Amino acid sequence: METYFSLKPLAAVLVSLLATVLIVIPRQRPNVRESWTIIAAVAKFAIVLSMLPSVLQGNYPAITLFTISPGISLALKVDYLGIIFGLSASLLWVLTSFFSIGYVRGVPEHKQTRYFASFAICLSATMGIAFAANLLTLVIFYEILTIATYPLVLHKETPEAIFGGRKYLVYLLTGGVFLLFALALTYQLAGTVDFRPGGILSAQVGKNSVIMLFILFVMSFGVKSAIMPLHSWLPTAMVAPTPVSALLHAVAVVKAGVFGFARAIGFVIGPAMLHESGASGFLAGLTAATILVASLIALRQDNLKMRLAYSTVGHLSYIVLGMTLLSPSAWIGGLLHIVNHATTKITLFFCAGAIYVKTHCENVSELNGIGRQMPITMGAFALASLGLAGVPPINGFISKWYLVQGTLDVGQVVFAVTLLLSGLLNAGYLFSVVVRAFFARSDKFTKLDEASPLLVIPLVLTAIFSLLLGLFPSQFPHLYQLASQVASSVISGGRP
Amino acid sequence: MSSLSILTLAPLLLFAFISTLVGIWRLKWAYITAVIGIALSLVAAGTGLFRVLSEGILRHYLGGWPPPFGIEYVLDHLSAFMAIIILFIGLIAVIYPPQAGLYQTPRKGVPMYGLLMLLFAGLVGVVVTGDLFNLFVFLEIYSLASYALITLGGDRAVVASFRYLILGTIAGGFYLLGVGFIYFSTGTLNMADAAQLLPPLYGSPTIMAAVALIVIGMGIKMALFPLHVWLPDAHSYASPVIAAVLAAIQIEVAAYVVVRMLLTVFQPQYFIEVLPVTTVIGWVAAGGIIFGSVMAIAQKDFKRMLAYSTVAQVAYIGLGIGLANPLGLIGGLLHILNHAFMKSCLFLIAGGIRYQTGLHAIPQFAGLGRKMPLMMAAFTVAALSMVGIPPTCGFFSKWYLILGSIDANNWVFVAVILASSLLTAVYFFRLIEKIYAIPSSGEAAVEQATEPSARILVPILILAIGVIVLGLINAVIVTQILKPVVALL
């Protein structure tokens, strides 16, 4: 793999940070303020997209900024793994920005300037995590993301929101201190914190140290990835406005945790060392349990956002499970699911948001017959539900296919059964909403009355993406190719 | 041979008198001369640091008498580092308007600026002197100035100051006794000379007693738990700008003395292996970190919370000394710099809030975020740094301390540092939540609050921006200045 100097990774990080300033200055004129959000989002996506061709050729744009601690630089490098995360987060930010405008004006929400400014910082941090070339850089952006999300969680400033914010901080900051410990231990064990496919620990590192390091990573990244029993901040954080739940608690923040696992397992500890230590089985068991338990809890939730939140908890564990299985197929499946779960789950959250703005309904039991009033919204909801349940030809099927294949590759039939069972449970808790919406009678929702185009167009687009990624997984943006490159480089450990 | 070390000190002493004298005539001129004096010293210290970096240690023999007969002033990496911190924070403190920093403009004739200058002179004197007894003299100069300055905070401050005076004098006495023992054993007071003569005497009980006395004395001065009892009252009743100076630079100078003993006067092995000095300091500091953090959570008064936070934060420095390995000591020394910026920023903000609204209790702060966005943004930055969120400087102190703890295989210290981050988060996020998210109770003080004037705001913002900049450039400071300091370990 070759790298070349490029300012683009830095620009991708900084563009929304700059936008934060521009958002705060014209706070009295909402249209000017929001146009900065849109401009920054589009610019960020364009920058990330423009790096794709060279990354696909194995030529990584990279920039080393300055030394941040003796021997460690603040450095960005866009590799196969980074661009998967960067591309999906930046694309979905564009759509979320439009959706946000429709949402906060439709509800209407207070303190919108703080809302949009925090959002922009979150996306800067997300890009920093995606493109971090070493663990210290990743940790810096990871913590910034934790803090920048906090104002969005307590945005409503109701006692409930403040409690949600507190819980969020307790969980995430605790994860953060374990991450600092993991970082320091990595540095002591390896003498470097630069990511390298296949890991950076030398063979001399003892088994116990590897296990300890791995457990520290589980305790830190496991919080953002909402692995049970570290998950309970996520349902509580659903008190945030829906676009926040959509982008941050289905795509950016939680995927940052999952992405951290990909870096920790594939690029720090390394599959070989992890396999030798035997510690990965413990995380695989934890994630499998999370998948089932979260799905069962989701079945019992009447609040639509809570149901989606528990669904997210389950699906994040799909991805982590894929990484702990240490087989190429499982890795491909996990990485594809980062994107596939993102497009489908954000569609569902957008639908929940559109329903809330239009009807102020939050509970599944109130949605009888809503398909008559909002057919487009509920149509997108149905399509995304199929995707999450793993029905072809929606994209969720493809990631699940590879995940199941990965479990069989390593002879772990029990995990294959877990995944299939979870598919049924997914169908149970999502299709019940669709069935209510289209087939139940109601005299409340009788005439066609969709939410504003600012809300509907983004959710239609994300639904279409889900379909397209399912039909053409190896077409542009070549996700399959990216994922399989990551998987082969990680599993072969840089060895050809 | 260079006179920069004495030039760092001389303007302070000189202008302390000038400032006091002109202050009798015109208060404004006292202010102007104080600023000039500190600025001159700062320039000398800055030049000194550059000379040290390029040429090595700078020595000055007072009156041309070579040591061990005369008094020597030394500017090396550590003392230049300390002097610049002291003088920079000192300059900010003097610029900060007294009506906010002292609750009121001092009356004509009250030698406030002169006392501050004497305080800074004492602090700088301690760090540039190469003489054990001369160090005691400067120790007393800054202590006496501190006692007087604390009393400016009002009636309760007078009592607190008196308590501090008693303990501070005991501490000074301990130090003097220790130095006396060293003098009787070696016949010298010069640090470099003593370092030559001491090794054969390392087995002597007299020297061991001297070390114990000096370390305990300095433990009181730096408020190292459980010798901190004087600090919470003194720092919370002192007016904000005085509290800022005391918390940010004054108590740290005592930590400097311990480091100087560890590295220069004695060989580090003596403190690490022969006597368990660093081990004791480390464990005591670990206790102090937890104690200070827990006590800070229990406080309702903002300044009192900051005072207990100081007990915890100075213990970080103690922990770094206690680790006595290069990375740990780097963490401790870097924390002197980082804590100086964070804590002075927070105390000046306390002064700003009190001046604008009259409020000082945390529960009353609800809703201030909307009223003073810039000052509260500065508060947030400083608070995040205290918690240790990157890229603020507070993160990097913890980073080096944790690396040092892992190096020392001391997992308890790792746990203490991590736990204290969370405890610190509890008491600072409680405030952040209060300021930004809890709706104000409609109190007139909050409703009518406005952003303070630029004279109050600018020093606060400089410190807050410094908190971020120091985090980003910490590698330069560590490799250029601190690595040579810890090279002896």
Image: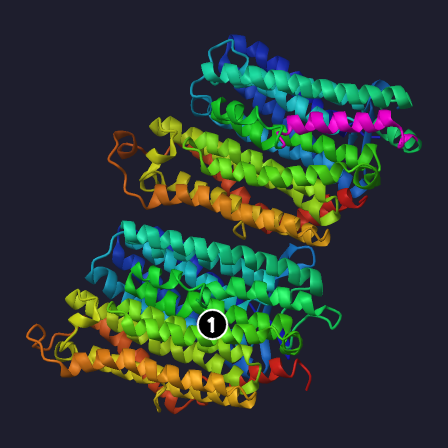
Determine which quarter of the picture holds residue B198: top right
State the extent of the magenta-drawn residues as a range: B201-224
At mark 1, the secondary structure is helix
Provide residue B398's location: percent of width, then percent of height: 60, 48
In this view, the residue in front, B337 or A293, is: A293
Provide residue B287's location: percent of width, then percent of height: 61, 39
In this view, the residue in front, A3 or B406, is: B406
Chain on which label 1 sits: A
Residue B73 shows up from this direction: no
In the image, residue B217 above or below residue B484: above
Q: Is residue B48 magenta?
A: no
In this view, the residue in front, A476 or A294, is: A294
Residue visible at 28% across and 79% down in the picture:
A430
Q: Is residue B211 magenta?
A: yes
Q: Quadrant of the C terminus of chain A?
A: bottom right
Residue named by callout 1:
A86
Question: Left of B381 or right of it: where is A119?
Answer: left
Q: Most prominent secondary structure in the magenta stretch?
A: helix
In the image, residue B263 above or below residue B141: below
Determine which quarter of the picture holds residue B167: top right
Determine which quarter of the picture holds residue A252: bottom left
Q: Which residue in the rendered view is the most extreme toward the right?
A: B200
All told, the count of numbered labels is 1
Q: Quadrant of the N terminus of chain A?
A: bottom right
Residue visible at 65% across and 26% down in the picture:
B220
Type of amino acid under label 1: Gly
Provide residue B109's location: percent of width, then percent of height: 51, 8
Provide residue B291's location: percent of width, then percent of height: 55, 37
